[in-house]
Structures are given as structure tokens and as C-alpha cells.
Image (spheres, rainbow, N blue to C red):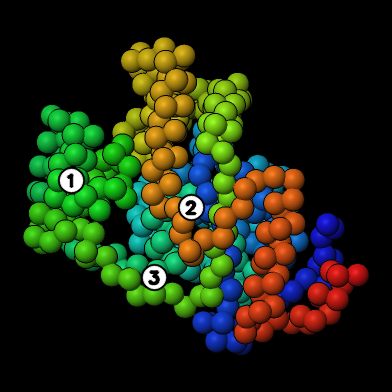
Amino acid sequence: MPSLPLDTQPKVETKAPKSQLPLVIIVGPTAVGKTGIAVQLAERLNGEIISADSRLFYRGMDIGTAKPSFEERQRVPHHLVDVADPDEVWSLSLFQKCACQAISDIYARGKLPFLVGGTGQYIRAVVHGWQVPKVSPHPQMRAALESWAQVIGGVGLHQRLSLLDPTAAGAIDPRNLRRTVRALEVILTTGNKFSVQRVSAGTDYKILTLGLSRPRAELYARIDTRIEVMIQAGLVEEVKNLLGRGYPAEAPAFSAIGYQEIVSHLQGKYSLDEAVSQIKRSTRVFVRRQANWFKPDDPGIRWFSVGERTLEEMERVIQEWLQGSEIVWNRLSSVWNVRTK
């Protein structure tokens, strides 16, 4: 199906109440094909994309994150990509603030925002309007927890968190020491679970959530192929370059799958083959963890099995959703007349 000319694309009437303004969310596991489909949908529906993938924030980390290509970013504007250096910390609250600002900016340009990614917490923060606990840092507590992690390891510290707050632990990657430490810091400082201190204020957006899926064996095969391509494309050289620029191996960004293993390889802990095998194993584990956020039986997600007609089916669902809502579109009827000719 051809794309609409720009002058016949639907535009949001920004004078409408914010509660009537639409937000399309596209979720699914790593390597399922979210980026390619999202770019095509945004092209067809006059949209822009906000990344909800925590790995895409960092400049210079392109190969190992499967970052949208230069060509894809030229076709459709992308937001929250390349917004931080690898040694900077991007918190959940900062992402939430910047994502909501990007959505408002997209509305102001009369376009349709697409929030796309596989980081469940980041999606939920926007969808449910999470108010992250505002607990002041406790330097002594944090230092003690970091010292403890050096003794029992980051995974060991995460296991301690799971005993105190299983819900919080389930939402945090065991490899993400910074977030594990912060959750324990809040628990031990306040005496309350970290998970119950997160308040949901609801959302002002009208939301349509679409999920992409593939059979597990097919998805794993795509993951393996993608990792092999990353190695061939220069992932090792990319990590060498980042380390050579002075970014420490302990930088938050290096906790991302792929980078941590290649750092270990460069430090002599793994052979390259061992590092690649570990990346594949870690990615499979991550996919299973993603499934805890985006469940097949979630009534709030409309799922699509990726195939030849997926793009057209998703576009039709979005159009019908927009037509059936109270969203005010400029020249809406003329747009659909054009599309159905």
C-alpha cells in the first residue's frame, strides 16, 4: 500500500483536550522486527518515533544496540536516540520526562507519536504515568551496598533484593547494578518496598498498544543471526573505540547485553567465541524477561504475528481506532477518501 502524500496525511488538532490525543505504542521482544515495521507505519501515518529502548540512549553504541540506521532515521524522525554519553546515567524518571516532552512536541507539529521499544518499565512509566519515588540519595548506604556487591557480585545483590521485594527485583535486570543498588537503598532507607512506592497517576493520552510476536524458535534464530552480523560489522572494534576514548568498563551503558561480554573478552576473561555464546544466552534470558512485561494474554495489547500482511493489518487497525475515537483530525474524511480510492 503506497504512502500518503504529506499534504494529505492526517494531522492532530492540537487544540483538542490532551485526553483526546492519540499515542500508538509498539512492543515486542528483541529482534522481533519492531523498528522496521514502526518506521513504515510512521511513514504511512505521518508519525514520529520515540524510542523506549534504554540501550539506544547512548552515542557511539550503534552496532551492539541494533540502533535504527541513518537511512531509517532520515525517513522518520526518532527521539531519545543518541541523547547521552556512555558514562551518563539515564534514570527512569528522566526518560519519562523526556518521552512526554517529545510526545507533546510531536503533537505540536501535527503528527502522530509512536512509542516503540522493548523496555517494559519505560513503556509502563508513560502508559501509567508512574510517579517514581522521590527519596533523596543516601551516600553512605549506597557506598555500603556497592561494597557488598564487590563481595557477592551484582547478581548476588539482586538475589538479596528479590528476597525483600520480588516485584522490584523482577523489573530490574540482574546485570544492572546501579538500579539494584538504588532499589535496596530506597527500601533500607524508608523501610518500605521499592515497588509499592511507585504511584500510578494514570495517563492523559488515548493509547493503542500493538504487539509483535514470532514463534520462539524463529525468534531465537533471528537473535543468533543478528549477533553474528554484529560481530562481523565490528562490535569488538566499537567497544575498543569506546574504551579507548576513556569510558570506563564500569560505565552504566556497558551493562547492556553484548557490550559487557565484549569488554570481558577484551580483558581476557572470554575468548571471542565464548563471548558470542554468552551474548546469545543472555539475549534469550532477556527475551523471557520481556515476556513478563508484554504477556500474550494481556487484554491491553493487540498482538500480531509477523508475516507478509502484518504491516497492512496494523495500519488498518490504527486507522479504525482513529476513526472510532473522538480524536479531532484535520481533513480526516478527505484523508480516508484518498486512502480507499
Query: Where does residue 194 sit, x and y in percent of width and height?
Result: 20, 58
Seen in the image, is 291 located left or right of residue 110?
A: left
| Residue under pointer 1 | 161
| SS assignment at label 3 | loop
Relative depth, front residue between 305 and 203: 305
How far, Cα to Cα, is label 1 from label 3?
Answer: 25 Å
| Residue under pointer 2 | 296
For marks 1 and 3, the one nearer the N-term is 3
User: The residue under label 1 is which amino acid type?
Assistant: Leu
| Residue under pointer 3 | 129
Mark 2: few/some/many CA within 10 Å (<14, 14-19, 20+) = some
Residue 336 drawn above or below residue 268: below
Report the quarter where the N terminus lies: bottom right
Q: In the rendered image, is residue 23 in sight?
A: yes
| SS assignment at label 1 | helix
Query: Where does residue 221 sit, x and y in percent of width and height?
Result: 57, 28
